[in-house]
Image: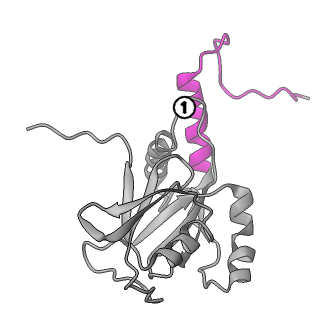
Amino acid sequence: MRKLQTQGVHHITLVGADRHSTIDFWEGVLGMPFVFDQPNLDRPSEGHLYFDPGDGRLITVFTNEDRKPPLRRAGTEVGAVHHVAFAVSLATFRQAVTRLDARGIKHSGPKDRGFMDSIYFEDPCGLLIELACYKFEPPMGCSHADVMILAHRLRVAAGDANIQEVHLADAIEALVAERQQSLSSDRAPKDPYRR
């Protein structure tokens, strides 16, 4: 038996309402460029709109002019999508409340998740959207996942309930020490201000 090894998210496809509300939300609210448009190849009566969420990958939405946004929370039964999270910069995150409020979009307000900050709101079809802002940048040559797995191990060893900023800082320090060479034979913390 062998695995089918994934190498990242290729795209996510959502069932949307009409074309106009779809473009207005994904491009007009979230700023995702509308990059491709064709019929749904499995159901030609529907549209298939493609948006770039900012990393060159794709969010796609099936549209149908007979569907209107229900303006209520989408189902959360077993097998349903609970929410979709998009990365934003710290500058954008700090503007999220003001910009959502200006549009009259109800939201959760900022939530501290230990390793990131989040804010939640619904799209017109009731899908819960999260804007997430990491509290750290991984060291050169490392991914966010590299930092997270080490921070998790440090959290568990400390007996803490969730990842905190101290775990992130210690994980980053350890990754740099492991991956970046130094001419120093002793890389332990030093006190250059000895008095």
Which residue is at a point 54% across and 23% down the rendered structure image?
A: 179
Give above or below for 66 relative to 23. Answer: below
Give above or below for 169 relative to 43. Answer: above
Quadrant in the rendering for residue 89: bottom right
Q: Quadrant of the N terminus?
A: top left
Which residue is at a point 23% across and 63% down the rendered structure image?
A: 42
Which residue is at a point 74% across and 68% down the rendered structure image?
A: 95
Q: Quadrant of the C terminus?
A: top right
Q: Can you name the residue that lies furthest to the right here?
A: 195
Observer-nearest of 70 and 155: 70
Give above or below for 174 relative to 71. Answer: above
Residue type marked 1? Leu
Residue 173 drawn at (x, y percent): 61, 34
Question: Does the stretch in magenta take in 192?
Answer: yes
Quadrant in the rendering for residue 110: bottom right
Which residue is at a point 57% across and 51% down the rendered structure image?
A: 54
Residue 12 drawn at (x, y percent): 38, 59
Task: Report crowding for label 1: few under 14, some 14 to 19, many 20 or more residues within 10 A (C-alpha).
Answer: some
Residue 175 drawn at (x, y percent): 54, 31
Observer-nearest of 137 and 54: 54
Question: Does the stretch in magenta take in 71?
Answer: no
Q: How many marks?
A: 1
- State the colouring used for the structure image: one colour
Q: Secondary structure at mark 1?
A: helix
- Answer with left or right where residue 56 lies relative to residue 182: left
- Answer with left or right where residue 117 lies relative to residue 67: right
Give above or below for 163 relative to 45. Answer: above
Magenta stretch, residue numbers: 166-194
Observer-nearest of 176 and 108: 108
Q: Can you name the residue that lies furthest to the left here?
A: 1
Residue that numbered label 1 is attached to: 175
Residue 56 drawn at (x, y percent): 51, 46
